[in-house]
Image: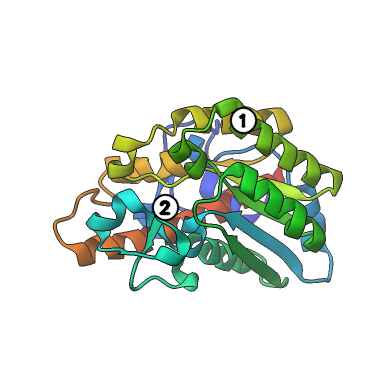
Amino acid sequence: MNAIHRLLFGGCVALAAASAAAAPGLPDECSAPADLVATEAPLPRLRAALRGRDPVRVIVLGTGSAEGAVPREEAERLGAEPDPARGNHSARLPDATPDSAWPARFAAALQAAHPGRRIDLRVIAKPGASTADLRRVVDAEVLREAPALLVLQVGIADARLGRAVPDFGADLEAALDLLARRRIDVLLVDMQYGATTALFINTAPYRAYLRWIARSHDLPYFRRHELMQHWFDNGSFEPHPADVARARADKLRMDACVGGQLAALVEMALDSP
């Protein structure tokens, strides 16, 4: 059992315990109930790569949030700017950079947990992409690069389009089948939570399907939507701050929390047999 796992979960007799913990190096506002950042699914290829000598290749494949964008429904609250080049699905924060988005924060936390290894991160962001679109990216790009780990963020575009959940699931299953044949580890991530977005888009059926697929394929699943909602509900972050600058700052801090907790989930998966 490694240091991050001990610090996060030492003293817990059950992963579903109600106690909360923040990943090492993160502030208390990043604390989360243990059952939201728990997994028993392994990451065998990533574990082997971290024991080797070559750089460890990790790809994050997702929609607009992978490059720091926010759902269009949250744009006014955050003072975000529409980007016609990326369609009308998401908006960009003026002060957001690739280094401030959750994938870069995740890679930095993973690198800190393994200082003797080099983590090479590639982010493939496809704003507005459905799971069918992402499956094609897996086939065309991810398989060619053969990373040790693919972090696959899916669901929001399918929910916004109102795609039938079985169709969403079939596309995801097809992508996972391609990845399994190449023995590429996969970690599933669901969509962002936003109070305004939740008024217009029902993501629950897609998240339920993600949970089922993760269990049936024995994959780690990072419940980002529930985690972000928890932070809003418990007062770590204000869902409707009056000041736009505060809302933007909260978004950047929350991305740091997401990245850190995602790295903690990976460490737990690395400890799984």
Instruction: Judge whether 76 appears above or below 15 on screen.
Output: below
Is residue 85 something that shows in the picture? yes
* Spot occupied by residue 249 in the image (x, y as percentages of width and height): 29, 65
Instruction: Judge whether 184 appears above or below 199 on screen.
Output: below
Look at mark 1 in the image and give the residue it sits on: 167
Using the image as rendered, state which of residue 73 and residue 217 is in the foreground. Answer: 73
Q: Which numbered marker is on residue 89? A: 2
Secondary structure, mark 2, is: loop
Is residue 273 something that shows in the picture? no
Distance in Å between CA atoms under marks 1 and 2:
20 Å
Q: How is the image coloured?
A: rainbow
Q: Nearer the N terminus, badge 1 or badge 2?
A: 2
Q: Tell me if 250 is positioned left or right of 181 in this view.
A: left
User: Which residue occupies 29% across, 56% down?
Assistant: 75
User: Which residue occupies 75% across, 49% down?
Assistant: 185
* Spot occupied by residue 191 in the image (x, y as percentages of width and height): 47, 44
